Image (cartoon, rainbow, N blue to C red):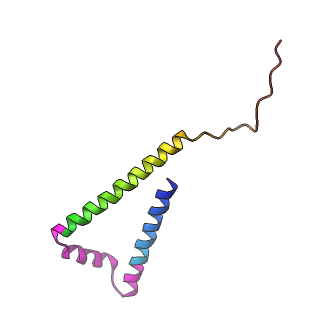
Amino acid sequence: MAKAQALIEKVQRDLESGDQQIRNQGLDPQKVRTTLQDQLTPQASAEARAAFEADMAAVDQEVGEERARASFATPARSSGGPRRPRSMI
């Protein structure tokens, strides 16, 4: 889970960095995306969508595997040590 979250945060930082570079050129990032999307052919759009879905499937699989590993991990004990034996009466 931590790896997936770190990857998501990295992608968000990269996207923001790209937007900042576009702003530094004096352009509006949203308008640039719209213009580039309009120029995309249907085949290229389908390929991009397929690549995105493959990446998301890989992330989902990795998250599932991490959850499975975490479920088999031994839980941490809340007590500070072993219990004292009770005396039998």
Magenta span includes 41: yes
Residue beneath the point at 50% across and 58% down? 3
Question: Left or right of 71: which side holds 46?
Answer: left
Question: Left or right of 73: which side holds 65?
Answer: left
Furthest toward the left, the residue is 42
Residue beneath the point at 26% across and 66% down? 48
Furthest toward the bottom, the residue is 25
Residue beneath the point at 29% across and 62% down? 51
Residue beneath the point at 25% across and 74% down? 34
Furthest toward the top, the residue is 89
Q: Quadrant of the C terminus?
A: top right
Which residue is at the front of the view, 18 or 57? 57
**Residue 65 x %, y %:** 45, 47
Magenta span includes 22: yes
Which residue is at the front of the view, 27 or 38? 38
**Residue 28 x %, y %:** 33, 81
Which residue is at the front of the view, 28 or 54? 54
Write the start and end of the magenta stretch as one range: 19-43
Whether 42 is drawn above or below 56: the answer is: below
Question: Left or right of 64: which side holds 85?
Answer: right
**Residue 49 x %, y %:** 25, 62
The main secondary structure of the magenta stretch is helix
**Residue 69 x %, y %:** 51, 44
- Tell me where residue 30 sits by quadrant: bottom left
Whether 81 is drawn above or below 29: the answer is: above
